[in-house]
Amino acid sequence: MEIINDYTTKVDELKNTGYQVNIEDYLRKGLWIFRQKPELFLIYTALNLVVWPVGGFFFAGPLTAGFFIVAHRITRGKSVIIDYYFDGFKRFIPLFLVVPVSAILISIGFVFFIIPGIFLAVAYTFAIFFIIFGKVDFWEAMELSRKMVSAEWFKIFILTLVLGLLNFLGALAFGVGLLFSIPISFCALYAAFDDIIGAN
């Protein structure tokens, strides 16, 4: 409960004060994190690229969480082995639910009004982080992410746009580039969350 209250307080403060979004710093930090364990990131990303097309609906949340968990351990100077990438499965239910529920709401926004769909797609950027580091359920995580992002929505939109472009360029390199662009972009996203509100 203390962690939940701590994040709720921080989000309320950020809504009032706003915050800086340093995209260049996040990309640099993301690359640094990747370079600490490139072989493990490459193996895990390759596994994700195999699993996502066939089991993405069930495993996208926990598998994505793995990138953030390992990025956190590296940033805090802790040891990393391949097992830690799968720690997201310890919170399987909320991490499983956050993906389809947010996707449904985003889709509804796109169907009826395109702008709300775009807004929600960006607003839920950090939902998985709150499940991992805040130990909250999927809906509370989505709400915390929405409130935090809303304070500086356009800046976060630009960040997601840059990371999307990075992965687009990775896909152009015969798809092989995704093995590098995906982990680097996820690590950069972790760096953003850690800088803006702090990963417990």
Image (tube, rainbow, N blue to C red):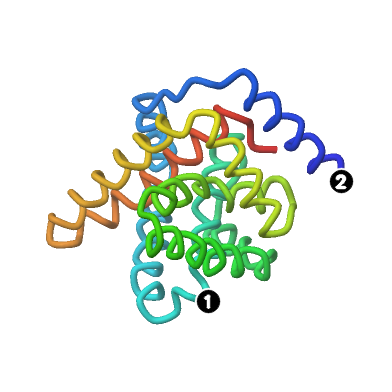
Which residue in the structure is indicated by mark 2?
1
Residue 134's x, y, as percent? 72, 46
View extreme (front): residue: 112
Residue 48 versus residue 127 in the image, above or below = below
Question: Image quadrant for the C terminus?
Answer: top right
Q: CA distance from mark 1 to mark 2?
A: 28 Å
Which of the two residues, 102 or 182, is positioned nearer the viewer here?
A: 102
**Labels 1 and 2: the sequence-earlier one:** 2
**Residue drawn 51% across and 62% down?**
105
How dense is the environment of label 2, judged by Cα within 10 Å: few (below 14), some, or many (20 and up)? few
Say which amino acid is labelled 1.
Answer: Phe
Q: Which residue of the protein is positioned furthest toward the bottom in this rendering? A: 54
SS under mark 1: helix
Q: Nearer the viewer, residue 23 or 144?
A: 144
The residue where tag 1 is placed is 58
Is 69 left, or right, of 21 in this rendering? right
Looking at the rendered structure, the secondary structure element under dot 2 is loop
